[in-house]
Amino acid sequence: MLPDLFSFRTLPGVPYFRRASCLPALLLLLSVAPAAPPPKVVTLYLIGDSIMADYADNYDPGEDYMETRYPVTGWGQVFQEQFAGADLSAFDGVFQADSVYVDDRARGGRSTRTFFQEGRWRAVYETLQPGDVVLMSFGHNDAAESKPERYVDIEGYQEFLRLYVSQSREKGATPVILTPVARNYPWKAGRLENVHGEYPAAAMAVAEETGTALIDLNQLTMDAFSKRGREYVTANYFMNLPAGKYPAYPDGQSDNTHFQPEGARVVARLVFEALQRVEVR
């Protein structure tokens, strides 16, 4: 029975309101279910170099990727597809969301220093929202001593990683440090070995020092490529191409750093799986 709150006494000059006149409106109000909350979307920002870059997304404005770049493929270019149909509860240790949007800001030839100096990090920083994730993978170009325009020594490399970590946290985002992806050399006794010198260890040291989640992608790729075998990896993962097969490389290509689509997808899968295991402190 409805409370007497809806019963009104008549007073001189005041009309009488019957309880029944309020009942339909009240029932309608009670029947309206609360609106479902909007889906929560987390953005995964990728910052790094050519190994992570998305060449298909207007990388060269006005150019046809299939004619000018394909089959070169950054692992970040195929990272979004890893989340199709995925159970996102597996990532609760890093983020909680109903859907994932991968925003790949990586660019070829960039080191930790040049990515910052060109304002590329600032463009990411200004759009970061609480709960976003920043995956950072540098080292290939930092280690290029023969190219002073991009070279960064170990101390500088670590300092820029610290900067990206601290400023991500300032915005409430979660940083994740990745060691650099393996190149297709050197091979010894059937196994691929580290070509990046002290840079992977330096990245791991920053992760430990700052309490930052780490994916040792250098080790993961060395192991995965070694298991698949040098001959297969060389022909199918890396950009070693025969002449006449692709318009962008009429004379063929010999490149043991950058990936074909199959190699990029293998790396993207390794990152996808590792991201479910990392510890955010």
Image (cartoon, grey):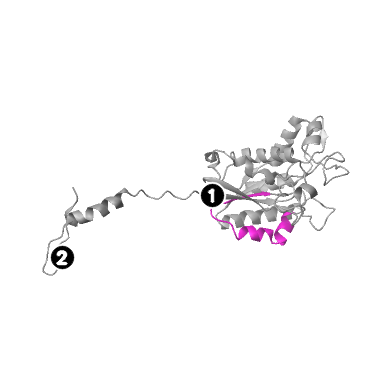
Residue at image coords 47%, 50%: 38
Residue at image coords 62%, 40%: 82
9 versus 220 height, above or below: below
Q: Which residue in the protein does label 1 denote?
A: 41
Q: Are marks 2 and 1 in contact (CB under 8 Å)?
A: no
Residue 152 lies left or right of residue 214; in this view the side is: right
Percent of width and height locating residue 275: 61, 41
Mark yes or no: residue 281 visible: no
Percent of width and height locating residue 268: 67, 41
Front residue of this view, candidates 13 and 230: 13
Residue at image coords 63%, 42%: 81
Q: Is residue 235 rendered magenta in the image?
A: no
Disc marking residue 206? none
Between tags 2 and 1, which lies in front? 2
Mark 2 neighbour class, 10 Å CA radius: few under 14, some 14 to 19, many 20 or more: few
The magenta span reads: 111-136
Label 1 sits on what residue type? Val
Percent of width and height locating residue 232: 79, 32
Percent of width and height locating residue 229: 78, 30
Front residue of this view, candidates 132 and 191: 132
Residue 150 lies left or right of residue 279; in this view the side is: right
Q: Which residue in the protein does label 2 denote?
A: 15
Label 2 sits on what residue type? Pro
